[in-house]
Amino acid sequence: MEESKRVKILQFVQNALLFGDSVVVPTHIDRHLMAFADEEFGQNWIEAQEVVDVLATGLRSILQSRGSTEPPAYDLGSLMAHLFGIGPLHFHKVPFLLRNLLRKSVFKNQLRILDLGAGVGISTLSTIYFFELLANSTRLVTGVQEEVHLTFTALDSLDEALRLYQKHIQGYRPVFPEVQVDVASPIQATLSPDPDSLANTLGRDRYDLILASHVLGEMRKLGITQRAKLLAELGKYLEPGGSILFAESASSAIPSEMNQLKARAVGEGLTLFAPCSNAWEKPTGRQCYSCGNVSFEKVRRPNIADIIGTVCEDYSFDQLAANNSWVFGILRADDVIHHSQLEIGSGLFTKLAASPQAENGRATVYGAVAKLEVGRVDNEPYFKLCDQTCGSDVAWLKFAPEVGVPALENGDVLELENVSVVPAKGGKNKVFLVVDGETRMRNLSRDFRLLPSKHVLTQEVVG
């Protein structure tokens, strides 16, 4: 595929995830969830008080589990509450990580995927959703239907979870026929870092992707060291070039512990591949080290969340979304890092406080994008620059309205020439970099073209 077309495909997928513009209509998934609930609870489940009580109890169980050594009780109520309530909060993290992988590699046409702690299949559904986005973006840009065959294996300790997973995923029909989905026989087992236990559980199977989303944070009875060893052992079940997608939510895990878990997993022999970067020093060797926590205030609100919020008065999707943050990364068994230009000694980066500035407060700055957040006051997007690439300064990147918001992602290395440097008031150690019409910006990771923050992915956009 021509590189220009590949870049545009990546742009479309990224903007669809960031800004909610998607040709895979979100209500398509809502309709599937509603049909699943109808089958599980009956056609009038929204009006049935006993069902409302089951879901409300399940939501309370999940919300109260944070900080406890015991995971939530996965009965039907909490499983369904996780699917309808907590699920949307981490629905988009797996697609973001998949896009980071796609940016540096090409997926095979046939992928074997292991979903750890699969529950009712949120991570699996998120993965299918990503490949639907990818299929449609590829159609728009190239006019070609590129088939992909996904085979999912679910692993969970509860038979009830696996039963719901199989019903949920086997009943899902992707919008695009080129995305084919198969569900292999599930694995009912409890994860253990013991190599013999894993060998007995997984046999000789190997996988292209292992989804470790929203599961290791709940395994609190295993210490961080044991869970790190578990991740390292799982790396032995990857196909060459395969990846473990690690994502945990603060709704069920303590972010500082999850960052330790990632670092220790690297110490056990894995490579933290993405999505961010550490340019000054790599804590345990050759890796990209993730900044860790991401606020997801702009999580897309599925229609099903409105329904649950209506029938369960003590459920607040807005509160969950506002307080949610993420620890995430891509772990690999090989020695490939995400950004080769971030090797020590590249000479690109200077502490912001030491950057020479003109009298008008402008300078040339290099930095790596760490995360995107939305301002609580102005509701505008801000990109945080990695502290390691800006010395100790807390730097936020903002784009003037006349420039538009570019298609950036975590780990992008930017050269900002003639950017406006605005220190925060009150002497705080914070700097705002404002890109306007006089600024020249180059993305050294990949030279993306600027796109408006809102767009519809249609043939007219492709041009």
Image (spheres, helix red, strand yellow):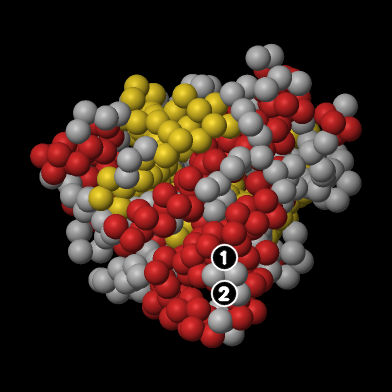
Question: Who's the residue at 64% across and 72% down the image?
Answer: 307
Check whether the beta carbons of the residues at disc 2 and disc 1 lie within 8 A of each other. Answer: yes
Q: Position of residue 48 (x, y in %)?
A: 56, 81
Above or below residue 59? Residue 100 is above
Q: Quadrant of residue 222?
A: bottom left
| Sequence-first disc among 2 and 1 | 1
> Helix, strand, or loop for circle 1?
helix
The residue under label 2 is 45
Q: Position of residue 356 (x, y in %)?
A: 67, 41
**Residue farthest to the left?**
196
Question: Who's the residue at 17% across and 47% down the image?
Answer: 193
Q: Quadrant of residue 220?
A: bottom left
**Left or right of 65, for residue 175:** right
| Towards the viewer: 212 or 201 | 201
Question: Who's the residue at 57% across and 74% down the image?
Answer: 45
| Towards the viewer: 112 or 162 | 162
**Left or right of 243, for residue 35:** right
> Helix, strand, or loop for circle 2?
helix
Q: Position of residue 54 (x, y in %)?
A: 45, 79
Residue count near mark 2 (Cα–Cα under 10 Å), binned few <14, some 14–19, many ≥20: some
The amino acid type found where label 2 is placed reads Trp
Which numbered marker is on residue 98? none
Quadrant where the N terminus is found in the figure: top right
**Left or right of 197, for residue 289:** right
The amino acid type found where label 1 is placed reads Asp
| Towards the viewer: 76 or 313 | 76
Above or below residue 4? Residue 73 is below
Q: Quadrant of residue 253?
A: bottom left
Residues under labels 2 and 1: Cα distance? 7 Å
The residue under label 1 is 38
Residue count near mark 1 (Cα–Cα under 10 Å), binned few <14, some 14–19, many ≥20: some
Q: Position of residue 442 (x, y in %)?
A: 71, 30
